[in-house]
Image: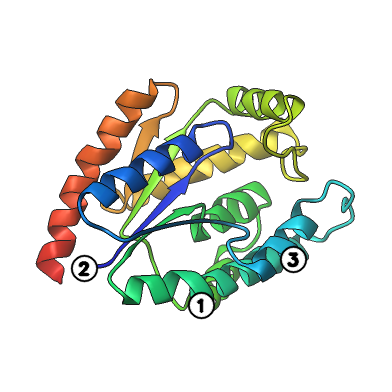
Amino acid sequence: MSLFITFEGPDGSGKSTQIDLTAAYLGRLGYDVLCTREPGGTSIGNRIRDVVHDVVHTEMATQTEVLLYSASRAQLVQQVILPHLKKGGAVVCDRYADSTFAYQGYGRQQDFETLRLITRFATQDLKPDITIYLDLDVKEGLKRKLAANTAGEGEWNRMDRLKLEFHQRVQAGYLEMAQAEPNRWLVVDAAASVAEVNKLICQRLEQVLEIVKHEA
């Protein structure tokens, strides 16, 4: 009984911590859990990540940005995610296709039908069983990420340097997508404690696991 879980939200919202806790929870249930990330997760994807996130590439066209993220995603799905799911395992991914709709669709204001077409091709139409969005005030998220980068933790990348209005459009986009598909999305206030956020996630996962079990 495979399970595909994705986490979305700004860096600084606690995704890494909640991914680790979620993986531990699924492990206790007997799942073979694989954690991965976007962009990256493969040797090819990691090289793409270096290019697309490098702050020196200020000249990068939005179309290039879309295709690079999608190329990394295509490699990850084919090489890592699908093989693990086919074995009946659980995959927990830090970002997935919804990031493209949020950042390049709502943020960059690119054509959604074009993005859907590219995404279907890149993902082989693979959709998550549940997407967990850790919602955090935009300014607070950027503040946390900059502080972490200053402390030598994490990265301050090309996307982080975009204007506040861009990040606000991204956040609004995530919330709009979640509202449109409430059965797939769980929106959690990332300003709550780690324990409170994890409790809400585990409660929702219990429901998802029941649904997946009956559909299997």
Camera-side residue: 136 or 181?
136
Of the numbered discs 1 and 2, the one sitting upstream in the chain is 2
Residue 85, image x, y percentages: 35, 71
**What residue is shown with label 1?**
78
Camera-side residue: 112 or 147?
147
- The quarter of the picture where the C terminus appears is bottom left
Residue 128, image x, y percentages: 37, 61
Residue 40, image x, y percentages: 62, 60
Tell me: 188 left or right of 149: left
Camera-side residue: 106 or 4?
4
Residue 191 appears in the rendering? yes
Under mark 3, the amino acid is Gln
Say if mark 2 contacts mark 3, CB within 8 Å: no
Q: Quadrant of residue 70?
A: bottom right
How crowded is the residue under tag 1: few (<14 C-alpha within 10 Å), some, or many (20+)?
Answer: few
Element class at badge 1: helix
Under mark 1, the amino acid is Gln
Q: How is the image coloured?
A: rainbow
Tell me: 205 left or right of 128: left
Tell me: 152 left or right of 59: left
Q: Residue at x 38, y 20 (%)?
A: 193
**What residue is shown with label 2?**
1
- Alpha carbon separation for disc pair 1 and 2: 19 Å
Of the numbered discs 2 and 3, the one sitting upstream in the chain is 2
Say if mark 1 contacts mark 3, CB within 8 Å: no
**What residue is shown with label 3?**
63
Camera-side residue: 69 or 4?
4
Task: Indicate whether 117 appears above or below 146.
Answer: below
